[in-house]
Amino acid sequence: MSKAKYKRVIIKLSGAALAGEQEYGIDPQFINSIAQEIKQVVTTEVEVAIVVGGGNIFRGVAGSAKGMDRGTADYMGMLATVMNSLALQDALEKLQLETRVQTAIAMRQIAEPYIRRRAIRHLEKGRIVIFAAGTGNPFFSTDTTAALRAAEINADAILMAKNVDGVYDSDPVENPNAVKFKKLSYIDVLNRGLGVMDSTAVSLCMDNKIPLVVFGIEQIGNIKKVVLGEEIGTFVR
Ligand code: UDP
């Protein structure tokens, strides 16, 4: 069995990653393939916690741009992350992986409330913990949730699975000459305004010295490669 570079990681999946080819909602087939990948990761004996976004269903900013109260729209966004988390839990458990969903907003008929020490205990027992409902606060993002939970549970790194294969100096879709960074410092990310994470999340990672690996999820096997220490994507610290 190959040995993991990290002892404990947080995998951040954006909502878009669960939508697959679709523009909206959840693509069960795509979630199943992500679950298979995560199963591969677990074989390296790394402890895995997951933060899922909600952008495939609802984003607070989009709602408020259309005239909704921002706080209300953000709560809807957080609820969207709960749906995604349950879908991912379902797919993981079909592969006989033990999981727990913990929500930052209490909904005890559906999932456990977020309790830091309990989350750590689950991880120590080899369970995958999915953190749902973001931080529980409007005006934040699930990137910030990943940074916050990583600091709380003492994760060794955040693995940002994205639709692009790393961080570029400009948008690679629009600019064919965009250059990919192999390594970056957090302060560079902030100064250059690179769209890795929102600035709240970046600051939290920087202040708490949490390394970040940004890589593409489209290629199968990438999450495991990152966990084993292969240098793909962009490393930020
Ligand atoms: N959200 C929030 N507080 C949090 C996390 C998320 O209010 O701590 C809301 C916010 O409206 C956000 C939505 O949930 O737009 C979905 O999360 P995000 O946009 O981060 O998802 P992703 O872009 O990763 O799919």
Image (cartoon, helix red, strand yellow):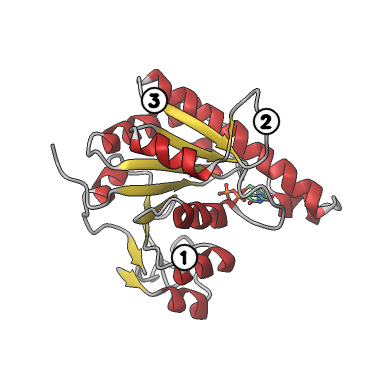
Q: Position of residue 114 (x, y in %)?
A: 57, 40
Q: In the visual, does 156 lie left or right of 91?
A: left
Residue under the image location 40 percent in, 63 percent down: 210
- Mark 1, residue position: 205
Instruction: Name the residue type under label 1.
Output: Cys
Which is closer to the viewer, label 2 or label 1? Answer: 2
Please give the name of the residue rendered at 47% of the width and 60% of the height, measured from the top-left corner.
Answer: 173
Q: Distance of mark 2 from mark 1, alpha carbons?
A: 28 Å
Return the residue at label 3. 98
Residue behind mark 2 = 107
Label 2's element? loop
- Does 51 sit left or right of 47 as displayed? right
Q: At x 45% / y 54%, what residue is drawn?
A: 150
Disc 3 from disc 1: Cα separation: 28 Å
Element marked by disc 3: loop
Residue type, mark 2 in image = Met
Does the residue at mark 3 contact the one at mark 2 (Cβ under 8 Å)? no
Going from N to C along the chain, the mark reached first, 2 or 1, is 2
Q: Earlier in the sequence, mark 3 or mark 2?
A: 3
Query: Residue at 61% across / 42% down in the picture?
Result: 54
As rendered, which of 106 and 180 lies closer to the eye? Answer: 106
Locate the C terminus by quadrant.
bottom left
Circle 1 SS class: helix
Q: Is residue 210 visible?
A: yes
Earlier sequence position, callout 3 versus callout 1: 3
The image shows residue 136 at horizontal and vertical percentages of: 66, 47
Which amino acid type corresponds to the residue marked 3 in the rendered image?
Glu
Q: Is mark 1 within 8 Å of ligand 1?
A: no
Disc 3 residue crowd, few under 14, some 14–19, many 20+, Cα 10 Å: some
Q: Is disc 2 in contact with disc 1, using a CB cutoff of under 8 Å?
A: no
Could you tell me if residue 24 is visible in this image? no
Q: For this view, does 76 lie left or right of residue 32?
A: right
